[in-house]
Amino acid sequence: MYRQSLQLREELGDRAGMASSWGELGDIERNRGNWEAAERLYRQSLQLREELGDRAGMASSWGELGDIERNRGNWDAAERLYRQSLQLREELGDRAGMASSWGLLGDIERNRGNWEAAERLFRQSLQLREELGDRAGMATSWGVLGDIERNRGNWDAAERLYRQCLQIEEELGDRAGMASSWGVLGDIERNRGNWDAAERLYRQSLQLREELGDRAGMASSWGSMGENELLRGNLELAEVYSKQGLQMAEEVGDTYLAAQIHWDLARLYQQRNNRTLAQQHYENAHQIFTQLGAKKDVEKIEREWRDFRF
């Protein structure tokens, strides 16, 4: 449908419409995990919007290109693009766009492990979304603030925020959001040592992601289920689930998730006293975290690796 629309717009010489169609086709490729194809389409759209002087469209394109770099794990490049987008949105008085940009910049800081900077940005975003009555955006903000509390080890505070998020997602019929919330609520139960409750939530999340064809989400669910089995000592299941998650993470280009699963597999092979495979997965995790600039993750795995003895 989008390609038919593009063809008609090209025939009519509708350059603004062509830019919009290229952006929509870029969204399709991004959702498929085809970052290179998505980037080409977004850049075509951006070039035409620059020629037309479409500043709102340019802000949107920079944001979309930032998403591509974030998904690749190129956080510095993503931040530059998001800040370009934010500056233009501030000049245009686009408050909804500003809320989105602050949230995305918060996500970058969260990935770097800078929780305080991330929280400030997410709360800026949440305040504006509340003023705008943007319920979907409010749900997103509550979810990411839940992530902050989870990473601080504040499980009860995290759970409250995630359940606020989930309630709105259910009211809005946001199935992708519901799948994500069930997954993070599973993480809460896993961190509390409630393995069975965690597994139920992960399976709810996985089932919905399979129905939606969300391969990136499925990779995350398999990885979470693998870690859950690892922590309760079911090494065979942990290996199966983790390898499934790793394969899918690599296919969709989610390098951060791949690094996390490599670390899980390193710990698994430690427990089996398989020095060669444990070292291999540790080095893979360390290399990826280092490339991503994930300093807190590098410090964590280095510390835990030093403490381990075969």
Image (cartoon, rainbow, N blue to C red):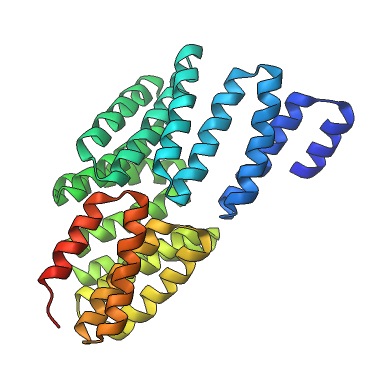
Q: Nearer the viewer, residue 101 or 195?
A: 101
Which quarter shows the C terminus?
bottom left
Q: Position of residue 4 (x, y in %)?
A: 82, 42
Give the quarter of the figure containing the N terminus.
top right
Relative height, residue 234 to residue 152 (above, below): below
Q: Residue at x 41, y 35 (%)?
A: 79
> Residue 58, percent across and down?
59, 25
Q: What residue appears at the point 26 percent right and 46 percent down from the top-left corner?
A: 147
Residue closest to the eye, 106 or 211: 106
- Left or right: 297 as drawn, with respect to 192: right
Residue at left 61%, top 43%? 39
In the rendered image, residue 201, in percent from the top left (x then y), is placed at 32, 63
Rendered view: 219 above or below 272: above
Q: Report whether 63 appears left or right of 296.
A: right
Q: Where residue 193 sits in the image (x, y, percent)?
A: 15, 67
Tell me, yes or no, if residue 201 can be seen here.
Answer: no
Measuring 20% from the left and 50% from the top, which residue is drawn there? 151
**Residue 121 visible in this rendered orientation of the protein:** yes
The image shows a total of numbered marks equal to 0
Q: Is residue 98 above or below residue 299?
A: above
Q: Is residue 305 left or right of residue 82?
A: left
Is residue 223 shown above or below 123? below
- Between 38 and 93, which is closer to the camera in this rendering? 38
